[in-house]
Image (tube, rainbow, N blue to C red):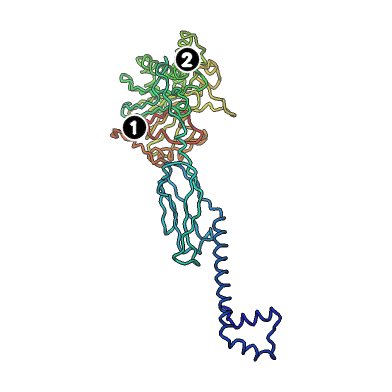
Amino acid sequence: MVEPEDYIKYLLSNKGYPITDKKEKLFEAFLKDPANLDAATTILTNQKILTNKYHIQNRLHDVMQQQVMIPNATVNKTYEAKLDFEKLGWTDFSFSELESLEEYGLQLDTTTYLISGIPSKSGDFKLKFRFRLNIEEEACELHEKPISFIVNPDPKSLWKNLESNKNDPYWKEDNVTAIGQLGDKNIVVASRRGRSHANVGSFRDDDFAFKHLEDSGWNVIVMSDGAGSAKMSRKGSEISCHAVIEYFEKNLRGDVLKEIDALVTDQHENNDDSVKKLNLFIYNTLGKAALYVHKKLEQFASANTAELRDLHNTLIFTLFKKYDFGYALLSFGVGDCPIGVLNKEQNEITLLNWLDVGEFGGGTRFITMPEIFKNEKFATRFSFKLMEDFSYLFLMTDGIYDPKFSVEANLEKAENWKEFIEDLQGNNADACKVEISKNNKDIEKQLASWMDFWSPGNHDDRTLAIIF
């Protein structure tokens, strides 16, 4: 704090009147005049007022020009972001508040300045940040700084959900679910039209079917994914699924049934030659079933003056039966839809088919392609598994596999299947839960809701069967 005397001495010196020893008594006499001290005091006071005013104006200018970034939010998605006063350099505020948050579905913790909530509407908004500097009077009017805040729309809302044409001769339900009992096991299936199809009002191309064959004790589950590029694939997938059930209803009986039961028993007892005989039986029986499907598709194409490629669809199916010593599982697959079975302890996964994914994409094969029956790999499309018991048997189309497993290698890891089950149990962004229990009356509804999960770039049809 500069004293009036010091200021006067400084002023006179700067004006050419330095206070030397000879002038000291003259200076003291000058100071004895109260008017002179009062004049200096007034000058100093005004200087302080001016300095403070400029300091405030300068600080306000800096605050107003300062760019403040609040992370973008998304409608219907839990949001948290903090206004960090330390990082912003706003430690010289005596009061602050942030208005307008409530109308967007958010709230502010005034202690931590944490913004949280679930945004209710999208847009590019201006939040009102009101504050007062600690060098200002309490009665001073609050200053207002607009802060940009962007709330992105819910990605799901950008997709249309147009009804498919019910007058189309090959129309099928957009979304279906089913439950049933397969021997001592239970099954729940959901098949959902993909967003890419719903967005343009086209059809669900996936299909499925299952049946417990009472006379033989075998259970059949089949799933097919119609090729999006094939104009009648939705019919092709339907024909394929029905044909598989039809084939085994007709053929898994009599001597064939006796033979497979004997071969499975021999395999369990490790009898010599049982592996070769069983593999040959599986190749013949399941191979004939696959060929039966192909012939059915050929017949339909011919009767409707269509090309076989117009019916392109992948095909996977599995059969299982409980014996006194455990479960026997047979399977076949062509295309990019996996079949996986988890042991009772859920620490070991067995894939019952390999996927036609291709090295550079475009490698998917379809049951409509005659060449798959002549290819040297045809025999490897069949599998057999004998196990004491299993916790889950899954069949899924690529609409599930792609977003949940990403690559084929992940299908071989038990930890990835554990994460998948935890996802089904509610460990997901939507907290959507499926209680996989035969006593759950809402299991179909829950699975259908879970199937609506959001995954950027993955908008294909989704079909999932869970046998438990």
38 with respect to 197 (left or right)? right
State which tag comes first along the sequence, 1 or 2.
Answer: 2
Q: For residue 109, what is the image quadrant?
A: bottom left
Horizontal arrangement in the rendering, residue 58 relative to residue 278 (left or right): right
Where disc 2 sits, the SS reads helix
Mark 2 Cα within 10 Å, few/some/many (few <14, many 20+)? many
Task: State how many labels appear.
Answer: 2
CA–CA distance between discs 1 and 2?
34 Å
Find out whether the residues at labels 1 and 2 contact each other: C-beta distance under 8 Å. no
In this rendered view, identify the residue nearer to me: 210 or 387: 210
Q: Which residue: 44% across, 47% down?
A: 79
* Image-based side of 16 in relation to 99, left or right: right
Residue corresponding to mark 1: 445
Tag nearer the camera, 1 or 2: 1
Q: Amino acid at mark 2?
A: His
Instruction: Decide if residue 160 is on the left or right side of residue 374.
Output: left
Residue drawn at point x = 39 percent, y = 18 percent: 166
Q: Which one is in front, 221 or 173?
A: 173
Measured from the top left, where is residue 315 in percent x and y?
46, 22
Q: Nearer the viewer, residue 334 or 248?
A: 334
- One can see residue 273 in this view: no
Q: Name which residue type carries label 1.
A: Lys
Quarter in which the C terminus is drawn: top left
Q: Where is residue 192 drawn, in percent x and y?
A: 41, 28
Question: Tag 1's secondary structure?
Answer: helix
Instruction: Name the spot of residue 314 as percent of width and height, x first.
Output: 48, 22
In this figure, which residue is indicated by the disc labeled 2? 294
Q: Point out the image quarter for the N terminus.
A: bottom right
* Residue in front for this viewpoint, 447 or 31: 31
